[in-house]
Amino acid sequence: MFNLKNRRYTGAKTKLLEKIDFVISKNIKKENLSFFDVFAGTGVVGEYFIKKNSFDNLLINDFLYSNFVIFKAFFETKDYNEQKLQEIARDFNKKDIIKENYYSLEFGERFFSAQDASKIGYIRKQLEILQKQNYINSSEFYILLASLLFSSDKIANTVGHYDAYCKNIKLENRFCFELISSLKLQNKNIKIEQMDANLLAKKLAQSDSCFDIAFLDPPYNSRQYSRFYHLLETLASGNEPELFGVARKPKPKNLSAYCSKDAKNAFLELVENLSKFCKNIVVTYNNTNKANARSNTRISLDEIRDILSSFGLLQNYEFDFKPFNSGKTDTTKGFKEHKEHIFILKGQK
């Protein structure tokens, strides 16, 4: 069964979790803590901390709908029949010959074999049918849909994202529908949002919200996550948009300011609002600034330090960290002495 950490995801913090924990534990020694995962991505950071005895409350947010679906499946599902889900999974895996559909026509022999793409499209339609027939409830729908996302991503012909696919490869039928393993967090208070981080922070700043820790892992460079994971977004939504180009992408939407020239201003606005209702702000960012236009960070480390320090007492930790490689990047150029920085702004509110 799939766990949250089983995803291939650009910038995932799975290998940095212990270092983030080290920084937080060294600076914050309290119980009954609340954690706001602002750019949650895979959700592994929120999962790591809400499982700790010292944390009781988690708000987990990401503006990609595919991530929202995954959070609902892992963090919020309570009323579901596991035997029923296993029977559905077995039925899906018995299906071999399936008619052409949107997924086989658009993604077959690109990201998947034609047969695997057909099967993925068939299962997505079946989930809608099962839900409309009330055979599955909301929790079961999210678990099955997240399972489809993980099962599809596991075999996709990519280097970990959908900006392109590997060419000149004979694609074999490899798809197998596997269930995700939902988290058992009944004794924790968890809320899930799917919003632009700045809009959510502004909304919460105007309410009576209060968090002990806000964790920020914003996009670092110009690569838009909604474009990197367009296929999973389409699969999650159930829509069948018109697609363009070799990578079969829909028209651009859900674009982040953090991947643009406005990143610095967006970060300043975000920190200003978070400082109104969060006692501590933790930020991760790296030092990639000599690679290429797409890989270089949009905000300099000095700019991050200046912005954060204007709102309180700032500490900066740095750790050696392997850089992300999109598959074509020469990591000997511009990635020497690559480091991940963890900032902690203490004593807010």
Image: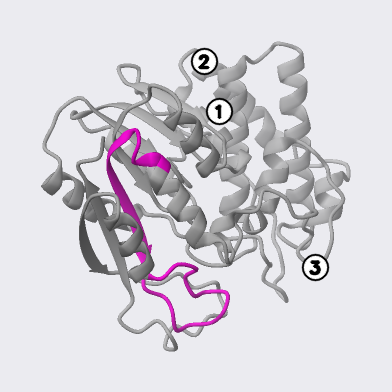
Q: Determine whether, in the image, residue 176 is placed left or right of residue 333.
A: right
Image position of 52 (left or right of 35): left
Q: Which mark is residue 246?
A: 3
Amino acid type of disc 3? Answer: Val
Figure quadrant of residue 340: bottom left
**Image position, residue 232 (x, y; %):** 66, 47
Identify residue for label 2.
Answer: 80
Secondary element type, mark 1: helix
Contact? badges 2 and 1 (CB < 8 Å): yes
| Residue under the point 30% across and 81% down | 337
Q: Is residue 298 magenta?
A: yes
Dot 2: within a 10 Å radius of its alpha carbon, few (fewer than 14), some, or many (20 or more) residues?
some
Specify the label residue 143 is tagged with. 1
**133, above or below 64, in the image:** above
Q: Position of residue 207 (x, y in %)?
A: 43, 23
Could you give the CA–CA distance between mark 2 and mark 1, rounded to whole angstroms? 9 Å
Q: Earlier in the sequence, mark 3 or mark 1?
A: 1
Residues rendered magenta in the picture: 273-300
Among the 4 quarters of the image, the one containing residue 123? top right
Is there a contact, CB below 8 Å, between mark 3 and mark 1? no
Which of the two discs, 2 and 1, labels the residue nearer the N terminus? 2
> Residue at horizontal 71%, vertical 27%?
127
Could you tell me the amino acid type at mark 2? Answer: Tyr
* Quadrant location, the C terminus: top left
| Residue 8, visible in the rendered structure | no
The mark that comes first in sequence, 3 or 2, is: 2
Kind of residue at disc 1: Ile
Secondary structure mainly formed by the magenta segment: loop
